[in-house]
Image (spheres, helix red, strand yellow):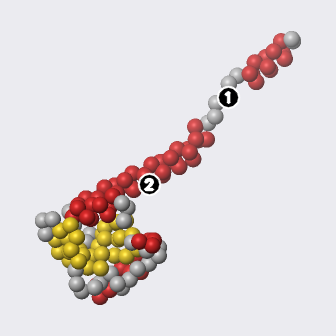
Amino acid sequence: MPSSLKTAYNKVKQPIRAPAWTYTGIILALGIIATGFISDQRETVRTASRVVAPEAGDVLAVKRGGGTYTLYKVQNTTADSAYLLMNQFETDQESGLNVIKGKGPSAYLPAPVGFSRKDLKIWLDQGLIVGVER
């Protein structure tokens, strides 16, 4: 093989490295996904701690049978129970809870229903409590 051709071959044969900026999009996307995952985990822990120790005024977003959602408001609590006011309205989508929330305190039934804190924890474990607003 002639030397000029051999030199050209050796230049082409050298490994090619991709520039660092080529991977910035992937790194950015992974960072956004990680941030979303961490945020979701924090919200899950926050919801669990609020269900275990409810306070008067807490609003529980609850998934009911048949795929409907509604709100329960904690009226008062005792050492082992929570007394909840049931909302009169339901929605078929979780996003519709904001509309129900906007109806104000008059949307809740006047008579509270008592539930044990253990029952609330079971609801949370079954995925029936989708959020708690304090």
Crowd around label 2: few <14 · some 14–19 · many ≥20 (10 Å): few
| Nearest to N terminus: mark 2 or mark 1 | 1
122 horizontally vs 64: left or right? left
Tell which residue pokes out farthest to the left in this image: 79
90 horizontally vs 81: left or right? right
Looking at the picture, how far across and down is residue 41, in whole percent? 37, 53
29 horizontally vs 51: left or right? right
**Which residue is rendered at x = 64% and y = 30% of the image?**
17
Crowd around label 1: few <14 · some 14–19 · many ≥20 (10 Å): few
Q: Nearer the viewer, residue 8 or 84?
A: 84
Q: Amino acid at mark 2?
A: Gly
Is disc 2 in contact with disc 1, using a CB cutoff of under 8 Å? no
Residue corresponding to mark 1: 16
What is the C-alpha distance between the residues marked 2 and 1? 35 Å
Looking at the picture, how far across and down is residue 88, in whole percent? 35, 84
Q: Amino acid at mark 1?
A: Ile
**Which residue is rendered at x = 32% and y = 86% of the image?**
107
Which secondary structure, mark 1? loop
Residue corresponding to mark 2: 36
**Which residue is rendered at x = 58% and y = 37% of the image?**
20
- Residue 63 showing in the rendered view: yes
Tell which residue pokes out farthest to the right in this image: 2
Which secondary structure, mark 2? helix
